[in-house]
Every structure is written in structure tokens, then in C-alpha cells.
Image (spheres, coloured by chain):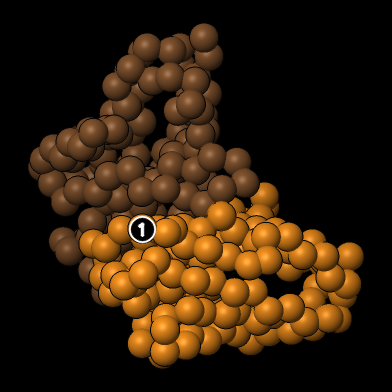
Chain colours: A orange, B brown
Amino acid sequence: KAGVTQTPRYLIKTRGQQVTLSCSPISGHRSVSWYQQTPGQGLQFLFEYFSETQRNKGNFPGRFSGRQFSNSRSEMNVSTLELGDSALYLCASSLVGDPTDTQYFGPGTRLTVL
Amino acid sequence: LAKTTQPISMDSYEGQEVNITCSHNNIATNDYITWYQQFPSQGPRFIIQGYKTKVTNEVASLFIPADRKSSTLSLPRVSLSDTAVYYCLVVRSDSWGKLQFGAGTQVVVTP
């Protein structure tokens, strides 16, 4: 079974731009979660989608948004990029997002904001 | 949410057993304890999950005492490839799709 895939793997943007990252979950998985990882703040939860609905949300500003499509693929968008948004963005999929479900992480998208 | 405390780093030699203890004093009745492993520039990988007593799989064991205020991840006979950051997480029963990571423990295995 193919794992979680994320595109692009690397991205360089400038302040003020916006960016869209994509995540394809493992086949059959309906829950997709997004995380941001930085050296200073560590791994932080952004949001989770299930059946095209945002079901859980972390403590990030409204510039961070996401969506999920009917095939469970998900995208996250960051608008008006700031230098502090430079990070590794990880998505994870699980069967239904139950707390006892294993989350399978993708390789991440490395975003650099200049 | 139960806060977790674990050592910042641990060193070990190849072939030894590594035990990482995590403290989670405020764990709630319906919370689960989960451990993930992360290599540099990769996403975390699930290792093991438990609720109480002992859980064992092909890569690790998880020991949880009766009061559940701590847990110990045991990695038997580590190799160089076990060098990674290990995260202890307390997962709430109502935290759909959300994992709350702490700082983790950097384990370094040397020959």
C-alpha cells in the first residue's frame, strides 16, 4: 500500500505571498491531519479534516486554512506568508481519526519564506 | 490535556536496552499513551500505544503502572538506526485526529 504523499517537497516563497500544499492520504483513510514543525516550537497541530469537514483545529491564525476533497485528498493554504512560517509541514492520515487510530505521516513539505 | 515530561536526551551503545520514562501526572481516565519516533527531516512514525499494564510489539515494549501517571518505552538491543527523537504523547479520547507533541527525547546510539 502506498504511503502518505505530500507535494511539493520543497518550496521557497517570499513574504506576503501565499502557498498551497497538497497531501494524498493512504488509500482508505478518511482523516487527514496537518502539523507544523519548527526548531523553536516543535511539532504543532494545525487542523484535521474528515469527510470534507474540519473537525478539529489547533491554535493558529486564520491565515492557515485547509480543505479536504471527496477522495480524502487534502490541501492547506497559508496566505500572506511571514518569515516565521518557514517550517516543515507534515500531514498524517488515519482511518477515521479516532484517538486509537495510528496516524501515518508523510515526508513533509519544507517551506522557506524569504 | 495531560502534559508529558521526558528526558531531553539519552545516549546508548549498540546492543543495549534503552528505557525512556515519560511522566504524565494529569492523565485522564480515557486517555491513551502513544509513542512516536522521528528521524531528521522525516515525519514521525508510530511505535506503540497502550492504556495500562504492558504492551509489546515487534519493535518495543510499553510499561504502564497501575496509576498510569508515567510510562516507560523499552527498546531492546538498539542499533545505530535507532538514533532518533522519541515522543511520548497522551491522546485524549475526544481528540479526533489531533496529536499533541512535546519536545521528545533525542536518543543517540553509538558503536
Residue at image point 43% right, 19% down: B79
Find residue A14 and report its image quarter: bottom right
Residue under pointer 1: A1
Give the camera-side residue of B79 and B61.
Answer: B79
Number of residue marks: 1
Q: Quadrant of the N terminus of chain A?
A: bottom left
Residue A16 place in picture, x, y as percent: 86, 81
Residue at image point 56% right, 84% down: A66
Visible in this render: residue B100? no
Residue B20 place in picture, x, y as percent: 36, 31
Q: Amino acid at mark 1?
A: Lys
Residue A114 place in picture, x, y as percent: 89, 65
Chain to which the residue tagged by mark 1 belongs: A
Residue that sits furthest to the top in the current view: B111
Give the camera-side residue of B39 and B68.
Answer: B39
Residue A9 place in picture, x, y as percent: 67, 60
Residue at image point 13% right, 46% down: B52
Q: Is residue A104 above or below residue A96?
A: above
Binning the other alpha carbons within 10 Å of mark 1 as few (below 14), some (14 to 19) or many (20 upward) gives: few
SS of the residue under disc 1: loop
Q: Is residue B110 above or below residue B92?
A: above
Visible in this render: residue B71? yes
